[in-house]
């Protein structure tokens, strides 16, 4: 694979170019069965980042056929992320663990159970708003309204847009633990929103804190050095 392709490691989140750290295998179902000929492709990718070097394993099942002397893949049927088991990103431990747990589980079951995934994601969204903005507990729809003037307009617009999508919006005023019928795309919207809020609110706040602390420490060191020099 001389040209390679761009890829984001699900373990370290680094964007890398994959050239020779990928290998795969095809298992063909040739036995007579009720569904027809099938091919299962499995792929290992090792992250080339020397600080990571972890591997991912994915599988894709296809309809296939033998034609013109070769196995041809037709329609993809289903895919699986085996290692790691979901697309959940790794976030720092200073984000409250219950929020990370709900987010991780929502990612894990997004395709197999979008309804349950969306329920966990809604609960996570509510937990983020309560923890970060310390709003008065109530219905999620009211808590979202409560932060309208506290957060930047674009972020609030994204939250407001997601809450109006399909059945997500139709049930925002009800019990947060109510399981609603959504499709994987709606569940993914909620998950993407949560990832954005984790980054924009928690991670950026912590990074800003570290930068300011570094400035304060540097200033204190320079002030101390001047004081010693003037003695």
Image: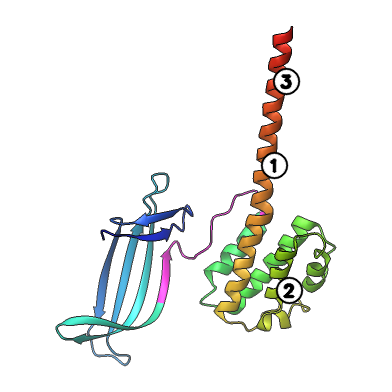
Front-lying residue, 174 or 190: 190
The residue tagged 3 is 223
Q: Which residue is mark 1?
A: 209
User: In x, y percent, where is residue 222?
Assistant: 68, 21
In the image, 219: left or right of 61? right
Is the C-beta separation of discs 2 and 3 under 8 Å? no
Please provide percent x and percent y for residue 5. 35, 61
16 on left or right of 90: left
Q: Quadrant of residue 179?
A: bottom right
Instruction: Say what secondary structure mark 1 lies in.
Output: helix
Work out whether 201 lies above or below 71: above
Disc 3: CA contacts within 10 A as few (<14), some (14-19) or many (>=20):
few
Q: CA distance from mark 2 to mark 1?
A: 32 Å
Main secondary-structure element of the magenta-colored stretch:
loop
Disc 2 target residue = 176
Query: Where does the N terminus fall, quadrant-wise?
Result: bottom left
* As drawn, 205 above or below 137: above
Q: Is residue 113 magenta?
A: no
* First to last magenta residue range: 79-96
* N-term mark: 1 or 3: 1
Work out whether mark 2 precedes mark 1 in sequence or the reverse, and give the earlier one.
2
Residue 219 sits above or below residue 149 on the image: above
Q: CA distance from mark 2 to mark 3?
A: 53 Å
Extreme bottom residue here? 34
Q: Quadrant of the C terminus?
A: top right
Q: Which mark is residue 120?
A: none
Task: Return the disc, 2 or 3, that comes first in the chain's sequence.
Answer: 2
């Amino acid at each position: 694979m001389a040209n390679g392709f761009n890829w984001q490691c699900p373990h370290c989140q680094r964007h890398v170019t994959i050239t020779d750290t990928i290998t795969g295998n095809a298992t063909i179902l040739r036995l007579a069965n009720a569904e027809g000929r099938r091919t299962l492709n499995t792929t290992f990718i090792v992250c080339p980042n020397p600080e990571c070097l972890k591997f991912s394993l994915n599988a894709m099942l296809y309809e296939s056929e033998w034609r013109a002397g070769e196995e041809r893949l037709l329609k993809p049927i289903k895919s699986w992320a085996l290692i790691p088991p979901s697309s959940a990103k790794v976030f720092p431990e200073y984000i409250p663990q219950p929020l990370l747990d709900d987010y991780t589980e929502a990612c894990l079951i997004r395709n197999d159970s979008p309804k349950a995934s969306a329920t966990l994601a809604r609960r996570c969204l509510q937990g983020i708003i309560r923890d970060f903005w310390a709003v008065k507990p109530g219905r999620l729809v009211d808590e979202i309204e409560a932060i309208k003037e506290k957060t930047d307009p674009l972020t609030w617009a994204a939250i407001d847009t997601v809450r109006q999508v399909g059945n997500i919006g139709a049930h925002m005023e009800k019990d947060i633990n109510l399981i609603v019928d959504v499709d994987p795309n709606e569940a993914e919207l909620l998950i993407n929103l949560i990832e954005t809020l984790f980054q924009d609110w928690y991670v950026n706040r912590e990074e800003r804190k570290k930068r300011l602390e570094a400035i304060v420490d540097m200033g204190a060191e320079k002030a101390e050095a001047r004081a010693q020099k003037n003695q």
